[in-house]
Amino acid sequence: KYVYIQSPYLILDRTLIDTLKIACLSGVDVRIMIPSKPDHPFVYWASCSYAGELLKFGAKVYTYGNDAFLHAKTIVVDDYICSIGTANMDIRSFELNFEVNAFMYSECVAKKQREIFENDMKNSKEITLEAYNSRSRYMQIKEGISKLLSPLL
């Protein structure tokens, strides 16, 4: 029914981005929350590019806070399973870094994590497809270059 993701970085490999697109097309409520304030500009611009790609398939994307960095690394699915840990949603975390995540198959914990996500949404701004498509040409160029560099980021 739903997949909620919070991550400071959103640099997805082809398998994960295709999986999230298919989920969106299947009617799954996919929501992604990233920071509103970057700690690394190229990583942030690449994250925005991947978020924009998912917006086109119906995902909902939020930027946390007003000029705030989001450090949460969580996933919660269908009030049944959640993951909390050190892994960002990026290629480096998946393939290079030694990350640790706890996967909890607990309805109680998953519901609590969903509530935390929904509470964080109150302090977030939704990025609509219209807003994303109307970003400046300069921002489009920065995102494009950053996406090309994303395997190195």
Image (cartoon, grey):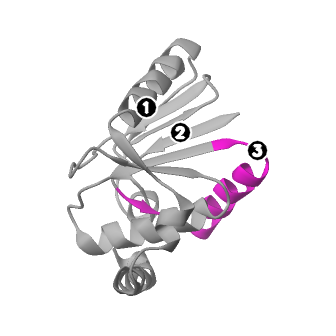
Mark 3 closeness class: few <14, some 14–19, many ≥20 residues within 10 Å: few
Going by the numbered disc 1, the residue's amino acid type is: Phe
Residue 126, position in %: x, y? 45, 49
Q: Which residue is mark 1?
A: 117
Check disc 3 and report its element: helix, strand or loop.
loop
Looking at the image, residue 151 lies above or below residue 114: below
Q: Which residue is mark 3?
A: 27
Residue 146, position in %: x, y? 37, 80
Q: Which residue is mark 2?
A: 4
Query: Magenta region: which residues?
Result: 9-29
Mark 2 or 3 closer to N-term?
2
Q: Are marks 1 and 3 in contact (CB under 8 Å)?
A: no
Residue 111 on the magenta segment: no
Residue name at image x 47 percent, y 73 percent: 134
Q: Are marks 2 and 1 in contact (CB under 8 Å)?
A: yes
Mark 2 closeness class: few <14, some 14–19, many ≥20 residues within 10 Å: many
